[in-house]
DNA sequence: TGACATATTTGGAACGTTCCAATTTATTGC
DNA sequence: GCAATAAATTGGAACGTTCCAAATATGTCA
C-alpha cells in the first residue's frame, strides 16, 4: 500500500531525472531523449502513476480542463440520450471527457448544474435547454468566455451557437407527402404550445396546408403533452370531430406512437385506415409495427455535430456564434400507408 | 472584461480581509463573524467569483473531489438512461456532480473512460459493466481505495459492492403466473447466452418449469439479441416449432415488444392469442398496446440505491463490499391475457 | 487594571502540476 | 581541440485553494 498518491516527483526520483523531465514526457514533448522517455514511462507503469488533471489545469489556468459539460432537459427521452451519446463519441475521441447532467425541465436544476460545472472548470458547454430558458441564464457563461452550444431548442437572443433541426421544413415535407398520396384533411397532433420548436413545426404545417391547397381547419390542430400518452389523448380528440381527418402529422415520434395506440383502441389500423407521420426518427420507429413514417433528425448525428462545433470554438479560442440548422429528411415507412404498397382509405377514416 | 479569473485573494483585497477569512466563509465555517461573512458574500457576488474546485481538492488531496463517475454500457437503452437519471438525482442532491459516460459495450472504451475519470479524481464509481468485464479490470480502482458499485450486471470475483435485480425470482414469478392462468408450454425468448444475467433468468425459468410441472422442452429456449429486432426473430423461430408454445417469458421488455411485433406479423394478437411477459418494466411498457405484463425492476430506483450505497461508502471512508439484490415484482397488464378480462387461447396459438 | 478565556482573524506552507530561464551535455565545423 | 551550436535537462516560481499555528481583538472576572 503506497502512502498517498504517486506524484510526478516520485517518478522523477525513481527514474533518476528531474520532475521537469517527467512533465515533459507526460506532454509528449519532442525535447526529451528517447531513452529517457522510455525509462520514465516504465517507471510510471511500475509505480502505478495516475495523472492529476486538477493540478495540471490549475497551473495552465486557462480553459484547458478537457472537460465538456453536457446538460439535457430529459435524459429519459431516448432522443436526448442519443444526442448525449453522439456528443460523447466526438468529445471522447478528442481526449475530452463529458460531464453529463439531466435537468428534468427544471430551470433551477439547470442553473445549479451549470454553476457546478463552472466550478469544475469546464472548457465548453452543450446545452439542450429546459423550457423557458432565457438568454439571461446564459449570460454569465458567455461573459466568462466559455463556449456554449445550445442544441435542439434555441434560446432567443442568446449570443451563443446553436444547432437545431429544420422543424419547419420537416413538417412541411411530411404534410406534402400525405397530400401527394391523396389526403385532404390532415391533423397536427401533440406538443406544448409554449415552445419555439412547436411554433416552428406548426408553422411548417400551416405553410404546407396553404401550399398544397388542403382543407384548412384550426380545430385540426390539437396540442398535447409530447409523449405517448399525450398522443393517445390527441387522436381521441381528433376522432371526435364531425369531419374526421384521414391523416396526421405528429409533434414527435412518441406522440405518433400514442396516436397509433389510440387508433387501435378505436379499431382503426394505423397505415391502413389512417395515415400517421412522426418526427425525430427514434430507433424504435424502424422496428415498430407498423414501421413509422417520420422525419429523420438523427439525434446522434446532431450530438456529434454539436460537439464538433463546440470543439472548434474551444480550439479557436474565440467565441463566434454560429447557427446551424440541421437538415432533416422524410423517411417513408408503413404508417402512412404508402410504404406497404397497400391502398389506404383516403376519405373518411 | 476582467483579466484572468477572480480569485479568493481578489475578494479578500476588495473586502478588506485576509484570504484565509474568505476561505472560511467559503466553507461556511462558524468561526467567522456574521458581519464579515455578509460583507464577503456581497463582494463575491459583485465580482462574479466562481469557486475553483480543482484548486481546492488539490489541497485537500484526499477523495473530496465531489465527482462521481457513472459508466453505463448502453445509454441508448432507456433502461440504462433511467438508471443514470436515478443516480444523478441522489448524487446531485448530495452536492456531487456526475461524470457520465457510455461504453457501447466496448471493454477498451470502458478502460479509457475509467482511466480518464481517475485522472479527474472521482471519489467513487458506479459501473454498469460492459459484457465480459472481469474482476481484474476493476483491480486498480479498489487498490487505490476508490469505492465502486457495480450495477445491473455483476462481475464475478471483484471485491466491490453490487446491486443487481433478482433475475431468478423475477422470471420464476412470470412463469408461475402464466402457469396459473393455464399455460403449459411456455417459451423463454431472447438474450445472449454469455452473460450472468441471462444465466440467472434462464435458471429462474427452469426452476419454475420444474416447480409448476410444466412441459419441459429445451427447444423452447431461444436466445437472440436483447433487442426488439432480436425478439421478432426469436418468436418467428418459436412459432416454427411443431408443438407451438402458447406463451413466452422474454429476456427483457425490448425483446417482448419485438415478440409482439412478430406475433402480429403472423396474424396473432398478443394478449389474446398468445401471452407475453417482459422484464424491466421500461416506461413504454405501461402505455404500449397491449400494455405489457412484465417484471418491474425500476431502473431509476436502482440507480438511486446504487448512488446511496456509493455515497455511504465514500462517507464511511472504508470500502466494505456489500451485495444488494434488488427485489422485483410482477406487474400484470394486458399482454398476458389476464389483465383485460378476456379469456385467452390456452392451447394451441 | 491585569490575567485569563473566548471569539475572530491571519500569514505562510502546502497540494501536483506546468512553464520559464538557465544550465548542463552532446554534436558539429573547422 | 576549441569555439559555436544544438539537444537535453533542470530548479524554482507560479496556479487558487485549504490548513495550521500563531496573532490579535473582545469579553469576563476578581
Image (spheres, coloured by chain):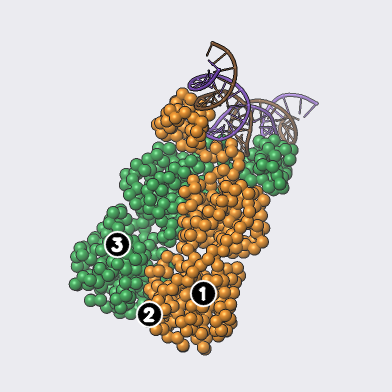
Chain colours: A green, B orange, C brown, D purple
Which residue is tagged 2? Answer: B341
Residue B338 visible in rendering? yes
Quarter that holds the C terminus of chain B: bottom left
The picture places residue A111, in percent across and down from the top left corner, at 40, 45
Instruction: Say above or below: C12 vs B335.
Output: above
- CA separation in Å, label 2 and label 3: 30 Å
The picture places residue C24, in percent across and down from the top left corner, at 73, 29
Q: Secondary structure at mark 1?
A: helix
Image point 55% across, 37% down: which residue?
Answer: B55
Q: Secondary structure at mark 3?
A: loop
Front position among marks 2 and 3: 2
Disc 3 crowd, CA 10 A, few/some/many (<14, 14-19, 20+):
many
Image point 27% across, 59% down: which residue?
Answer: A202
Callout 2: chain: B
Callout 3: chain: A
Let me know if marks 2 and 3 both belong to one chain.
Answer: no
Image point 32% across, 75% down: which residue?
Answer: A265
Let me know if marks 3 and 1 both belong to one chain.
Answer: no
Q: Earlier in the sequence, mark 1 or mark 2?
A: 1
Front position among marks 3 and 1: 1
Which residue is tagged 3? Answer: A224
Residue A170 visible in rendering? no
Tag of residue B173: 1
Horizontally, is B261 left or right of B237 in the view? left
Disc 1 crowd, CA 10 A, few/some/many (<14, 14-19, 20+):
some
Quarter that holds the N terminus of chain B: top left
Q: Nearer the viewer, residue A263 or A158?
A: A263
The picture places residue A311, in percent across and down from the top left corner, at 47, 47
Q: Secondary structure at mark 2?
A: loop
Amino acid at each position: 500500500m503506497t502512502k498517498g498518491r504517486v506524484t510526478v516527483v516520485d517518478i522523477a526520483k525513481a527514474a533518476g531525472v528531474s520532475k521537469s523531465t517527467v512533465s515533459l514526457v507526460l506532454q509528449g514533448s519532442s525535447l526529451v531523449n528517447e531513452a529517457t522517455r522510455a525509462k520514465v514511462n516504465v517507471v510510471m507503469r511500475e509505480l502505478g502513476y495516475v495523472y492529476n488533471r486538477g493540478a495540471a489545469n490549475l497551473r495552465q489556468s486557462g480553459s484547458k480542463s478537457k472537460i465538456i459539460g453536457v446538460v439535457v432537459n430529459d435524459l429519459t427521452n431516448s432522443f436526448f440520450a442519443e444526442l448525449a451519446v453522439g456528443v460523447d463519441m466526438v468529445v471522447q475521441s478528442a481526449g475530452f471527457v463529458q460531464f453529463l447532467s439531466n435537468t428534468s425541465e427544471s430551470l433551477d436544476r439547470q442553473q445549479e448544474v451549470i454553476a457546478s460545472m463552472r466550478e469544475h472548470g469546464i472548457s465548453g458547454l452543450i446545452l439542450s435547454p429546459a423550457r423557458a430558458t432565457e438568454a439571461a441564464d446564459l449570460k454569465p457563461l458567455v461573459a466568462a468566455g466559455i463556449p456554449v452550444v445550445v442544441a435542439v431548442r434555441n434560446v432567443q437572443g442568446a449570443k451563443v451557437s446553436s444547432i437545431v433541426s429544420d422543424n419547419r421544413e420537416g413538417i412541411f415535407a411530411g404534410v406534402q407527402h400525405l397530400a401527394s398520396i391523396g389526403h385532404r384533411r390532415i391533423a397536427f397532433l401533440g406538443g406544448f404550445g409554449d415552445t419555439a420548436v412547436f411554433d416552428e413545426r406548426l408553422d411548417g404545417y400551416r405553410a404546407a396546408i396553404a401550399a398544397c391547397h388542403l382543407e384548412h381547419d384550426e380545430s385540426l390542430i390539437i396540442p398535447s403533452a409530447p409523449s405517448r400518452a399525450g398522443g393517445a389523448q390527441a387522436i381521441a380528440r381528433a376522432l371526435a370531430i364531425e369531419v374526421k381527418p384521414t391523416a396526421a402529422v405528429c409533434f414527435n415520434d412518441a406522440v405518433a406512437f400514442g396516436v397509433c395506440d389510440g387508433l387501435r383502441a378505436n379499431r382503426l389500423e394505423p397505415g391502413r385506415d389512417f395515415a400517421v407521420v412522426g418526427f425525430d426518427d427514434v430507433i424504435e420507429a424502424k422496428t415498430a409495427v407498423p414501421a413509422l413514417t417520420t422525419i429523420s433528425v438523427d439525434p446522434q448525428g446532431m450530438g456529434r455535430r454539436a460537439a464538433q462545433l463546440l470543439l472548434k470554438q474551444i480550439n479557436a479560442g474565440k467565441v463566434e456564434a454560429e447557427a446551424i440548422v440541421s437538415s432533416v429528411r422524410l423517411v417513408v415507412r408503413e404508417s402512412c400507408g404508402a410504404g406497404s404498397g397497400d391502398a389506404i382509405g383516403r376519405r373518411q377514416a
